[in-house]
Image (cartoon, rainbow, N blue to C red):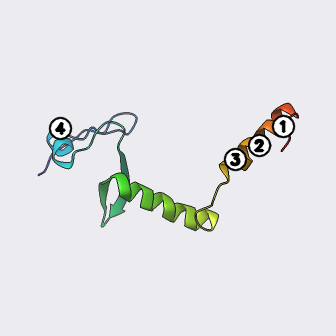
Amino acid sequence: MVSEVLVTRKYQVTIPKEIREKLKIKVGDRLLIRIEEGKIVLEPIKGREALARLSSIASKYLGGPKEIDAVKLVEESLRRKTGIYRY
């Protein structure tokens, strides 16, 4: 499937309806964009793929996924904001 699109003044393009429907791209979906052999490639990121990519980003920039103690986080926030929380 080949379609021609126009680049706007803001360097935006519209994905043609038949391509959106075939790939099930919806408003708010995220796409990866890259250059391959002088071509622009847009690749939809769906559900689990997005989580896997976020995990790999966390590993690369944060040294891996972090475990968060939500209760401790709330307690510390209350202590800072009010000064009255005691455990």
Q: Specify the quadrant that holds the C terminus.
A: top right
| First along the sequence among labels 2 and 1 | 2
Kind of residue indicated by mark 1? Tyr
Separation of marks 2 and 1 at Cα, in angstroms: 7 Å
Marks 2 and 4 sit apart, C-alpha to C-alpha, by 49 Å
Nearer-the-camera pick, 25 or 38: 25
Residue 43, picture quadrant: bottom left
Front-most of residues 86 and 15: 86
Q: Which residue is mark 2?
A: 75
Residue located 37% across and 58% down the image: 49
* Callouts 2 and 1 close, C-beta under 8 Å: yes
Q: Residue at x 88, y 34 (%)?
A: 83
Q: Are marks 3 and 2 in contact (CB under 8 Å)?
A: yes
Q: Nearer the viewer, mark 4 or mark 3?
A: 3
* Residue assigned mark 3: 71
SS type, badge 1: loop
The three-letter amino acid code for the residue at tag 2 is: Glu
Looking at the image, can residue 14 be seen? yes
Q: Specify the label residue 85 is tagged with.
A: 1
